[in-house]
Image (spheres, rainbow, N blue to C red):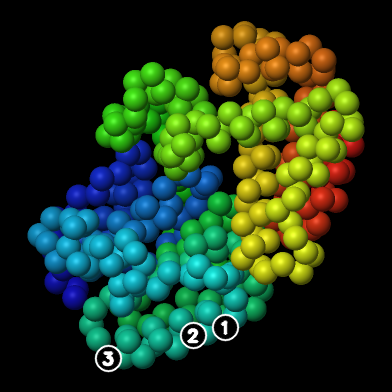
Amino acid sequence: MLEQFQAELKWPVFGHTRQVKLIQQAIKAHNLPHGYLIYGLRGLGKKYLSRLIAASFFCTHAVRPCMICTACLAVGKKNHPGLTWLPSEQGDIGIDEIRNTIRQTRLISATADSYKLIVLDKAETMTAEAANALLKILEEPPKNTLFILLAENINYLPSTVISRCQLLKLHPLTNEEMLSWMKEQKVAEHNQQIVLNLAMGRPGRALKFLQDDLSDYHQRMASNLVLFDRSVQKRFDQLDSRLKSIKTADSAISQRNEITEDFSHDVEYCEAILRDALLFRIDPSLIINVDYQKNVSELAWRLSVEQIGNILASLNKLRKEQTEGLNLRLVWENFLLAI
């Protein structure tokens, strides 16, 4: 109910002070936009912030969100009746999902005073038809309805959709904020510096490293370093090994997206290796992946600054081609030939 906005809002968020303040002020003043577009790099906490917003609406405690009441727990599991989270676990955001959500939202809004929240994760992956359907409801939204669009890169969203939302860009956390976050997460002291270096201000990225005590990090570093080997054959053998997870060209959309996201991590690792090579030329103590200084130093002296810059540009092109759904083997083979 609208009265719930009189409750105290206390969100356990590290960083993003300005963005949190803007949202909380809008909630307390009953002056919410029709839609928020929260965007920024993967791992900055876009989904976490969305859950806090939703839980603040539906929580039953005086200080919200409490994170322990039935409503907060339901929001955390994405099954609260007042919350719709797209896409579902099974696929993408298509025209049918948008239409069904609009239909349900109009029915609920016509019979209830409580708020309805719709979160569109990875909004930039919407089909053109889905984006057009969303635009119509953003232009004439049902009462007490808030759309929250989450995206890594808003350049892939139609400008008409962007213009109907209030934009909130999330930035990487400072080192001080990350250290405070790690203390809250009880990260072992001997791991804090390496996690700080690797996370690049992104708590979600740090969590991925910490889930298996950095073993996935070491495995990925080893495999991606092979992609820069002097031997072209070794590079292509490594690519073949990575592509084993692709079974057929007509695999399900959700599976293809999962594979593409996995390869996006490889792009980030390759970029980190090349950045270290540049930093090594300036001052070896500046490199991030300190356990791989020997490999980085070899690469730094084998490649010129211009060559490294060209490879980074090729990686940026590769990332774009991956998001456009082009053949993974083809785009990676083109990249390896360009090294």
Snapshot quadrant of residue 339: top right
**How far apart in space, not on screen, are marks 3 and 2 (Cα)?**
17 Å
Q: Is the residue marked by circle 2 packed among few (<14), some (14-19), or many (20+) residues within 10 Å? A: few
Q: Nearer the viewer, residue 179 or 3?
A: 179
Q: Nearer the viewer, mark 3 or mark 2?
A: 2
**How far apart in space, not on screen, are marks 1 and 2 (Cα)?**
6 Å
Question: What type is the residue that disc 3 sits on?
Answer: Thr
Seen in the image, is 24 located left or right of residue 283? left
Residue 291, given in percent of the width and then of the height, sits at 58, 17
Q: Is the residue marked by circle 3 packed among few (<14), some (14-19), or many (20+) residues within 10 Å? A: few
**How far apart in space, not on screen, are marks 1 and 3 (Cα)?**
23 Å
- Residue at x-position 62% and y-position 51%: 261
Seen in the image, is 262 located left or right of residue 324? left
- Residue at x-position 78% and y-position 37%: 238
Residue 15 is at least partly visible in this image: yes
Residue 109, given in percent of the width and then of the height, sits at 32, 85
> Does dot 1 land on a helix, a strand or a loop?
helix
Q: Nearer the viewer, mark 1 or mark 3?
A: 1
- The residue wearing badge 3 is 111
- Mark 3 vs 2, N-terminal side: 2
- Residue at x-position 34% and y-position 20%: 189
Residue 172, given in percent of the width and then of the height, sits at 46, 37
- The residue wearing badge 1 is 96
Q: Nearer the viewer, residue 59 or 250?
A: 250
Q: Is the residue marked by circle 1 packed among few (<14), some (14-19), or many (20+) residues within 10 Å? A: few
Which quarter of the rendered picture does the N terminus lie within?
bottom left
Seen in the image, is 338 located left or right of residue 178? right
> Does dot 2 land on a helix, a strand or a loop?
helix
Snapshot quadrant of residue 191: top left
- The residue wearing badge 2 is 100
Residue 97, given in percent of the width and then of the height, sits at 53, 79
Circles 1 and 2, Cβ within 8 Å, touching? The answer is: yes
